[in-house]
Image (cartoon, rainbow, N blue to C red):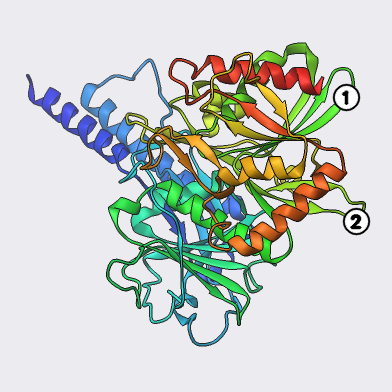
Amino acid sequence: MTERDLIYDFVENLYNYWRSLHRVLICDRTLDEMDRRPYRTFAETVERLMHVVRSTYRDIQENITGSHPRVYRQVSAGVEIGAIALPAPIPYPNGDYTALKNISIIRQIMIYPPMIFNSPSNKRKGMFERVNFNPVRGLHLDPEEWVCYPAKVGDLVVMIYFSMRFFELGFSLCNLFELAESDQITQQPDAIYLFGVPEIPGLMEGQSQTIFYDDEENHMLVAAVPCRDEFGYFGYLKKMVLTLHNIIVMKRGRLPYHGAYFHIRMRSGKESNVLIVGDTGAGKSETLEALRQIAGDEVEELIPIADDMGSLQIDSSGKVAGFGTEIGAFVRLDDLQSGYAWGQIDRTIIMNPDQTNARVVIPITTYDEVMRGYPVDVFLYANNYEVVDQDYPIIRRFENAQDALEVFRSGAVMSKGTTNTKGLVHSYFANIFGPPQYQDLHEELAVRYFDQLFKQNVFVGELRTQLGVPGKEQEGPLMAAKALLKLIS
């Protein structure tokens, strides 16, 4: 090998090493008003850096070889994520919240998808526990090491502060929750979430590390998760935020749900709004994706409203309307290879692609659709563990609210291994994210809402997806989709 070949290989390997790193650039100069012209800011920083790195690499390699390449590959050679983050005068109560005063708030984000990275963990375990002390009290956070993603979660604003140690997870929120408007971040938020704190003052030995506090005096919820690799999983970000959402909406008289909600319009002109409730791995998204595949010419439009969480509200006419929380989906690839149909592959953020429970975060709908408030026509519980036969049909309708409540309360599901549970498990209303922590409040709401659903003659039933039955992982959701299409046609 000649010296020229060695130099060429050195430059090539250096360039590849640079591109193997996770790279982020945060523009935080307060005097430049960068958020007024964000694209110009990104063009002068993020885009320029990318061109400088790429052109420098190409110039050096051409000087070494003395020739021009015939194929140019425009890979992302600068940073993967660019953000404009500036301080904002958030009117937090005096005292406990001083640690948050100087942390910059993200105003705009530029990403170069598809992005691929491995997080320290690929599973979530346990519940989020309510504590009787404020986890932000006594904290000391370095503003250079923290940023805040102000998320619109349904009609709520949750300030999600995350450590730069987990910046890939934090910035992935842009594919899941709409970024709050400028006027919204200058008001007191509905909730605060600290992801990756160095320690939680007041936490006792043996106590849960994933906690939240109900600051009733200041009408806010405050949550915190420590900076440990075991919590370095996107599920801890998403599910804690949705826990906070569910608790707040219950306090406001709305019933949270854990499920997939969508609006479907047939070619015949008939429209239906279908809500499928169930725990993780129950087959909600899989059935919906199968429905998209088989719909063909029969379906004019299928609009996702919620992929995971949302809430129900009784409107002035007595109808039960459903709302979502997210503009994106955190989709499992193990069973849902066709999940890319929910959006474009070039918009995805891919996590742990070489591991079990590989996931993508992908935008699937708009905030306007999430908040439109479609009245519920079909309300189903996703049963993934019972085999369909003559005695157990794919869809069965409950005769009364009491029978329906019994099944929904049981929350049975065959675990698919995306958390630390295995086998047939039960959780209150298939939703450990808020209802069990405020069960008395939730139970009162559930009885009222189910009674109203039956008064409005909404189809309330059970959908057997068979996703947890060995050998039925693909066929089960397909059969469920066909039965559902027949029901709403």
- Judging depth in this view, the residue of 35 and 453 nearest the camera is 453
Label 1, secondary structure: give it: loop
Q: Tell whether 410 sits left or right of 374.
A: left
Could you tell me the amino acid type at mark 2? Ser
Location of the N terminus (image quadrant): top left
* Residue 296 image offset from top left, x and y in percent: 73, 13
Mark 2 residue crowding within 10 angstroms, few (<14) / some (14–19) / many (20+) = few
Residue 72 versus residue 325 in the image, above or below: above
Could you tell me the amino acid type at mark 1? Lys
Residue sitting at x 88%, y 24%: 270
Q: Are the residues at dot 2 and dot 1 in contact (C-beta closer than 8 Å)?
A: no
Q: Which residue is mark 2?
A: 316
Location of the C terminus (image quadrant): top right
Residue sitting at x 41%, y 46%: 49
Q: Which residue is mark 1?
A: 270
Farthest bottom residue?
95
Residue sitting at x 46%, y 76%: 132
Mark 1 residue crowding within 10 angstroms, few (<14) / some (14–19) / many (20+) = few
